[in-house]
Amino acid sequence: MRFAALMALLVSVSATLAFWDTPKLEQLPTSEKAKKIILIAGKPEAKPTGEHEYFAGIVLLANMLEQTPGVHPILVRDGWPKNEKVFDDASAIVFFLTGDGKQAYLEPSKLKVIENAVSKGAGLVHLHNCIEYPADRKSLALEWAGGVWEKSISCRGHWVSTVDQFAKHPITRGVTPFEVDEGWLFHMNFAAKGVTPLVMINPPEKMRTTASSKKNAPNPETVGWAFESSKGGRAFSYTGGHMQSNWGKDGLRQLVVNGMLWSAGLEIPEKGAPNKLDPADLKKHLENKVAPKKK
């Protein structure tokens, strides 16, 4: 009897801890002065565990954003919120999801919601594949982000990179070199004005798969940039983000957290914004995804 009671107590405690550890979705701030940053995770994809962990990734990013006083991150999963009021008075919107026209926010009715938020001053952040827009939306990507992955000229590839080429900018404050096993999108089509390259890498020659990218060798390629539109809007884009484990890299976390806050119109401390991480959190909230089909 005592053993059974003990086991029941342990199950109850485990359930309680799991409840409190479950991220709260679409939680609005209680203070009108809070800087709202909306983080939108895409739907799970047919990738191995640890790859394209959109939801687990935004949970980590939200925890880091909360370390800056006055910032209220709002978590959204599966590509679009159930309550569109989360966008009201948004300071920034972060997209971490798939691309190539599969972005839910490109649907006409949803697109109007994002355009309305941007017109009122919301900054935009694109992480990983979502910077790949369909051809008929290329001009929109250039207007919003200052850059776009374009099939005819751009490349993508996965390799281990030492990232140590950074431009001087508020977003790179406190950023230190880091090594990542990463899936990159590179050789982007950039807007003529307003773009500040922030992070550069040197791709292996075999990863340059388009004529345009081959002509650019051996010059480094921009994989992270800031953008200020002619209308005063801010945006930050970073084409990495393939591996969940990479969020364990101090320099990467510093870069992305700074980028989100800068896009929201906040001043970045000289040593960078706080972004502490418990390594155990890297393995939390991973999706039960369908395994990719064997080729």
Image: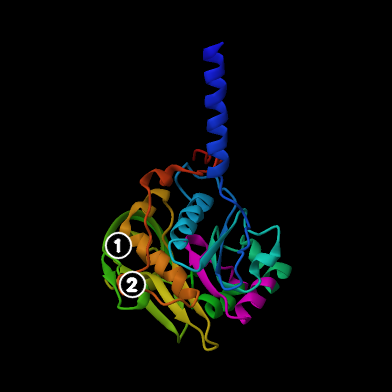
Could you tell me which secondary element the residue under label 2 belongs to? Answer: helix
If you read the primary sequence from the N terminus, does the residue marked by circle 2 or circle 1 appear first?
2
156, above or below 181, in the image = below
| Residue 250: x %, y % from top left | 32, 58
Which is nearer the eye, 236 or 1? Answer: 1
Q: Residue at x 31, y 75 (%)?
A: 270
Q: Whole-Å distance between the Cαs marked 2 and 1?
A: 27 Å
- Between residue 7 and residue 274, name the one nearer to us: 7
- State left or right for residue 218 relative to residue 14: left
Membership of 135 in magenta stretch: yes
Q: Which mark is residue 172?
A: 2
Residue furthest to the top in view is: 1
Q: Quadrant of residue 211?
A: bottom left
The image quadrant that residue 98 belongs to is bottom right
Type of amino acid under label 1: Glu
Spot occupied by residue 193 in the image (x, y as percentages of width and height)? 45, 87
Q: Which residues are magenta?
A: 113-136
| Residue 277 x/y as whole percent | 38, 52
Amino acid type for the residue under numbered disc 2: Thr
In the rendered image, the quadrant that contains the N terminus is: top right
Depth check: give the residue in front, 176 or 211: 176
Judging by the rendered image, the residue that carries numbered circle 1 is 205
Residue 290, horizontal then vertical, whole percent: 56, 40
Mark 2 or 1, closer to the camera: 2
